[in-house]
Image (spheres, rainbow, N blue to C red):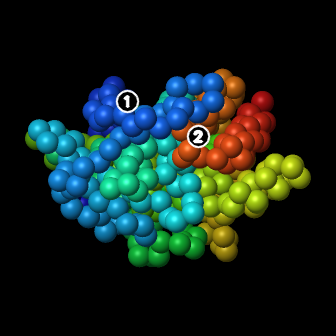
Amino acid sequence: MVFAHGIVIIANGEPAGGRPPASRPEPFRKSSLSAGRGSAAYRIVTVEGEWRTGSEAMGSKPKFWYRLVDEDDRWLFKYPREGSGEHWAEKIAAETAGRLGVHHAGVKLAMFQGVRGSVTESFARRGRILIHGNEVLSRTTISYDREKRFGQSAHTLSNIFHTLEASFKTRNAAAIAKRQFAGYIVLDALIGNTDRHHENWGLLVKRTASGLCGFLAPTFDHASSLGRELSEEKRRRGLQDGTVGCYSEKGRGGVFWSDSGRYGPSPIGLMRRAAEVYPDLFRQPITRVREQRDALRDVVRRVPDDWMSESAKDFAVALMHYNAAQIAHCMK
C-alpha cells in the first residue's frame, strides 16, 4: 500500500468487464427444502466442517471463512442473529442488486451443522486487498475518526465522493467509482439497508508494475434490511395499518448528509437529497429501479417457505414497492 500526501493512490479504475465475478455457478449440493410460491426456490448449500479455514474478526456477528477442497475461492459463512431474518435479507439484497446491475458480492443461503445462515463469496482475491472506507476517509478527510463506527457524522455522502475523487489518478476512474457508489445508495434505499457504515464499503487494490491498481469494491453486507428484525406481529400490523412506508422513512442510515447531523437520514431520505444534488450520478440506477419494480416480488418469493414466513415476504415486497415508488419520484 502506497500513500502520497496522506491519500491512497490508485493507478487506475478497472471497468466492469475487468472486475472479478460477483457470483459463480453453484458448486454445492442442493437440499430438499420447499420452494417459494410461483418460482423455483433458491438453492440451499451445505457447508462441511472440514472446509473451515479461519474466523473473521470484522463485524459484530460470529462468522467464519471456508474453502472447498481443490478450490481457490473463499466463502464467508455468517450466522444470523437469533430470531432475525438476516440470512434471507442478505440473499434477497444480492439478488436485487443483480437485477439493478449493481456490482455485488455473491450470496447463497446455507446450512452448517444444522444451523441456517448465508455465505458470501470473497472478492478480495487475485492479489487484491480490501481497503475499508474508514481507512481511506481518514487519509482524505481532516480529523476523520476511523475508529468511530456508529454515529460518525463525518461519514457524509459528499465526503465519500470527495474521497473517491482523491483516490484515483484519472477523472474517468473517479467518475466510474462515484457512479458505482450511487448505485449502492439506490440499492440501500430500495431494500431499506441501514448499515452502510464506513466499514461496509471500500476499495480493492493490488500492486502492479506501474503502481497500485484498483476500483471500488462490490457492495456487501446487507443483513440490516427488509424488516429482518421485526416480529411477525409487527410485520402483520404494519401491513394491515398501511404503515410500511413509515417504517422506511423512520430508519436511520449509516451515511450522513451533513457532518452536523446527530443521525444519518433514512436510506430513502438520503436517496431523495442525493438525487437532487447529484442527478447525473443517480439517473441510471433510478431508471433501473423503475424497470425492475415488477420483478421484486419474484426475488422475494424465491426464498424457501420454511426459511421466510409469508408475512415476512409480504412485508419485504411491500417495503420495496413503497421505496421503489419513492425512488421513481426522485427523477422525473
Of 318 and 151, nearer the camera is 318
The quadrant the N terminus occupies is bottom left
Quarter of the C terminus within the rendering: top right
Q: Residue 24's x, y, as percent?
A: 32, 31
Q: Amino acid at mark 1?
A: Ala
In percent of width and height, residue 237 lies at 82, 56
Q: Is 31 or 67 nearer to us in this picture?
A: 31
- Mark 1 against mark 2, which lies toward the viewer? 2
Question: Which is nearer the N-term, disc 1 or disc 2?
Answer: 1
* Residue at (27, 33) in percent of width and height: 27
Count the labels in the image: 2
Residue under the image location 57 percent in, 60 percent down: 84
Frontmost residue, 102 versus 64 = 64
- The residue beneath circle 1 is 16
Where does label 2 land, which residue?
A: 305
In the displayed structure, 276 sits above or below 260; it is: above
Q: Three-letter amino acid code at disc 2? A: Asp
Q: What secondary structure is found at the residue carrying circle 2?
A: loop
Inspect this view and state whether residue 222 appears: no
How crowded pointer 1 is (Cα within 10 Å; few <14, some 14-19, many 20+) is rated as few
Q: Which residue occupies 53% across, 72% down?
A: 150
